[in-house]
Image: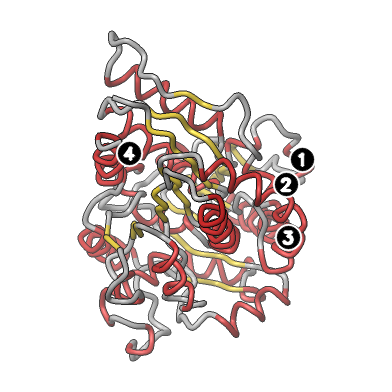
Amino acid sequence: MQPLNLFVSAIEYSANLHLANLLKSLQQTQTPFVLYGIFDKALIQQALKESQNIFQPNANPIHSNFLSQTIYNPESFRVMGFVGILKLIPKFFKLKNQLAQIASTCDVALFMDSSSFNIPLIQTIRKLISKTKYQKKPRIIYYILPQVWAWKPKRAHILSEICDELWGILPFEKNFYPKTAPITYMGHPLLDEIPYSFDTPQKTQKIAFMPGSRKSEIRALFPIFNQLAQTLKTQGKSAILIIPKSFATQDLSKIYGDISAFEISFDTYLGLQQSEFAFVCSGTATLESTLLGIPTILAYKAKTLDYWIAKKLVQLNYIGLANIFLEFHFFNAPKNNPNPSIFPIHPEFLQDCVNVENLQNAYLHFNYSYFFEQKKTLFKYLSHGSAESCAKKLQNFAKNL
């Protein structure tokens, strides 16, 4: 079979984790591929190596190759908030044409999350193809779609026009796209990744703290988490600080400050498995801890300007993904929820409400039976993972090259 030339734009850390699972599934189909673009090269190589050893320990190596160097390390593009995005604009314009040239020569161009970055890049690719009249055009696929159900609904129409396929990860996403949009629900990628899921409370006396993967998030949340950890220590609890693997070789004191009150874990799943409760930043991490069956409280603090802009633009009742998904499941739309003050699965604290007293009080009064009941509902709603279904689509495309 001819190798599939696959261009990828995966900036966010979570997108690279999802990409790794997709590529592992693709590797298991015996589909050879060559990978180009923006991705975490070390993470992907390690994932494919592990997959090769587990599923085909005695087989010849699958010919999955990499450029000797990615165009840009995703870490260079990870920012938080609207102000941070503005700083990336000059770098993006320098890089956009180069990326478009590479993507235009590939068989498939796969874009993941980060729509403010990826949509202009896709538009540049389309323009380049129309001008140069390439004989072979890449199939443009968007996987991990932008949250048009939260804000910027016009992006649904834009993506429908510039993409050949839209791979949704939420059952309700298609309702926000034109009826003619090439969108398919592929399943949710976290269901591919989680290695366990508890259905009852664990009694470990350990509390996990996850202040995020962006340094701006950590600066905002960790001082409060640190105080809370020391308070909970007086109640016989010990604290685990879960740190992104990408920080493993860095000076943690410069990122976090004093971490002497914590046991350190660079493995999210192992750290949470040892914990009976978790205090987590917003984003994918709260959905992850919830699906793992770890009772969770969400904490979110951002720059005042970023928060004010988001509040004006985003028409949602909640910030946590698990709460948002269940609200759509129960009410079809946030506006139909008769009582938003009741969180669908776990409490949320935002901005000035993120303080030791509020977090501790919510922890002491947490409704465990309600949490685990709603977790089961969330699993049924999301249904299945996405890696295998995405890999099958790429395999079929490769067969027809």
In the displayed structure, does residue 131 sit left or right of residue 216? left
Please, is residue 32 above or below residue 56 in the view?
below
Neighbour tally class for label 4: few under 14, some 14-19, many 20 plus, Cα within 10 Å: few
- Circle 4 or circle 1, nearest the eye: 4
Could you say where residue 73 lies in the image, as x and y percent from the top left?
A: 65, 39
Q: Which mark is residue 195?
A: 4
Horizontal and vertical percent for residue 170?
A: 32, 63
Question: Does dot 1 land on a helix, a strand or a loop?
Answer: helix
Identify which amino acid the numbered label 3 is placed on.
Ile
Q: Which residue is mark 1?
A: 253
Instruction: Tell me the distance, in whole angstroms, between the alpha carbons under discs 3 and 4.
Output: 38 Å
Amino acid residing under circle 1: Ser
Circle 3 residue: 89
Instruction: Name the residue rendered at 72%, 70% in the picture.
Output: 303
Q: Position of residue 34 (x, y in %)?
A: 45, 29
Q: Earlier in the sequence, mark 1 or mark 3?
A: 3
Identify residue type, mark 2.
Tyr
Query: On the rendered image, what quadrant is the C terminus found in?
Result: top left
Marks 1 and 3, how far apart at CA: 30 Å
The residue carrying mark 2 is 256
